[in-house]
Image (cartoon, grey):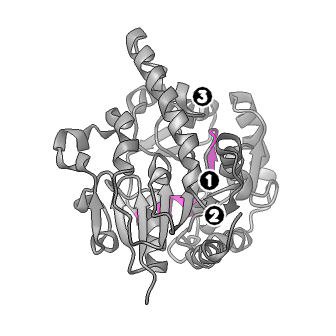
Amino acid sequence: MAEKIAIVHDWLNGMRGGEKVLEELLALYPEADLFTLFYEPGRVSPLIRSKRVTASRLNRYPWVRRHYRHFLPLFPRHVESFDLRGYSLVISSSHCVAKGAVPAPEARHVSYVHSPMRYAWDQYYAYFAGAGFLSRRVIAREMSKLRVWDAASAARVDRFVANSSYVRQRIQRYYRRDAAVVHPPVDTEFFRPAARPGRDYFLLVSALAPYKNVGTVLEAFRGLKERLVVVGRGQQERALRSQAGPNVQMLPEVGAERLRELYGNARALVFAGVEDFGIAFAESLACGTPVVALDQGGVRDIVKDGRTGILFPAATVAGLRAALARVPGLVLDAEAIRRDALRFSAARFREKFARVAASGGE
């Protein structure tokens, strides 16, 4: 009799890095049923839509769906409400509360963690810095409750899998558990080097959020002759547009083919924030383009300093400018850079995850 498998994913209202991981999990376990807090079929891929999806009761209310982040304190009780009886394997794909799902006593629970809950842990101040006095008091109380629940619910997981060494360290710190590292999949068949790359600009691909440190990159390029192309949207978009100098072109989110073109023709991808993994870094390398990034977080698993990019120690304008000054001396071998990125292929992800999920214990 075939094993019955459930996959629990935080929410399905767009196609971001976590949803790309989910697609590969569905390729590995095509008969799996999906459980999620919020589900908007028109905003996910045909593969996800083709599956049996169970959404929480929160999904019944359009206003809640539109403003779902405001209802974060309600998420734990709703992810715990999923009926997972009869499933012998539960896989959670979690950056918020999915890992807190309650499997049947005899079931095995493997949790792929994109990040421990950012809102409650390391990004608490970045997310809520702009709240008023009364709001801050309410938020502080609710986040304290969430931290307690998040740490306690880690006991429901049999096997943790982290998307990077950086996330593995945070799992150890917050949950006191070890984790295997399986890097997210990159579409290395699609992201390939350009035939005749122009190499006449630097590129930044990022959500325009405070913790991404995009402002530092814009300030570093102020007064330089080098061009910078910025791709992304977010809460800081208006402020960052006003900060951008005449040598900066800001684009909204672009399609996959346009993004591949931008990667392939850039001198380097630039970033000054800290990423859990950093899928854009791996996509850039797959296109044969080096990366200039802060030497913190998931980038350490991806970029080899002096070979496939440049890592700089401080998230400052001076630190980034010093790194940019090293770019002309970087030996650019697009095919060698691409070969290094093939370790992040979708096939490699499926192979490694299946092996880890089948293994016992930690």
Q: Position of residue 34 (x, y in %)?
A: 35, 66
Q: Nearer the viewer, residue 42 or 118?
A: 118
Q: Nearer the viewer, residue 362 or 314?
A: 362
How many numbered callouts?
3
Q: Nearer the viewer, residue 168 or 151?
A: 151
Query: Given the current orientation, which residue lies at the most extreme top position?
Result: 133
Placement of 134 over or under 260, stated as above or below: above
Placement of 123 over or under 180, stated as above or below: above
Residue for point 78% across, 37% down:
313
Q: The residue under label 1 is which amino acid type?
A: Phe
Which residue is under mark 2?
A: 183
Q: In the image, which is nearer the foreground, mark 3 or mark 2?
A: 2
Q: The residue under label 2 is which amino acid type?
A: His
Label 2 sits on a secondary structure element that is loop
Question: What is the quadrant of the C terminus in the image?
Answer: bottom right
Query: Which range of residues does the magenta coloring cover?
Result: 256-274
Q: The residue under label 3 is which amino acid type?
A: Glu
Residue 123 can be seen, yes or no: yes
Of the two numbered discs 2 and 1 on the same chain, state the one appearing first in sequence: 2
- The label on residue 251 is none
Q: Position of residue 234 (x, y in %)?
A: 40, 38
Placement of 6 over or under 237, stated as above or below: below
Left/right placement of residue 140 relative to residue 275 reads left
Which residue is under mark 3?
A: 219
Which residue is under mark 1?
A: 277
Q: Residues within 10 Å of mark 3 (few under 14, many from 20)?
A: some
Label 3 sits on a secondary structure element that is helix
Q: Position of residue 96 (x, y in %)?
A: 47, 46
Q: Nearer the viewer, residue 80 or 160?
A: 80
Between the C-alphas of marks 3 and 1, the distance is 24 Å
Q: In the image, which is nearer the foreground, mark 3 or mark 1?
A: 1
Q: Are marks 3 and 1 in contact (CB under 8 Å)?
A: no
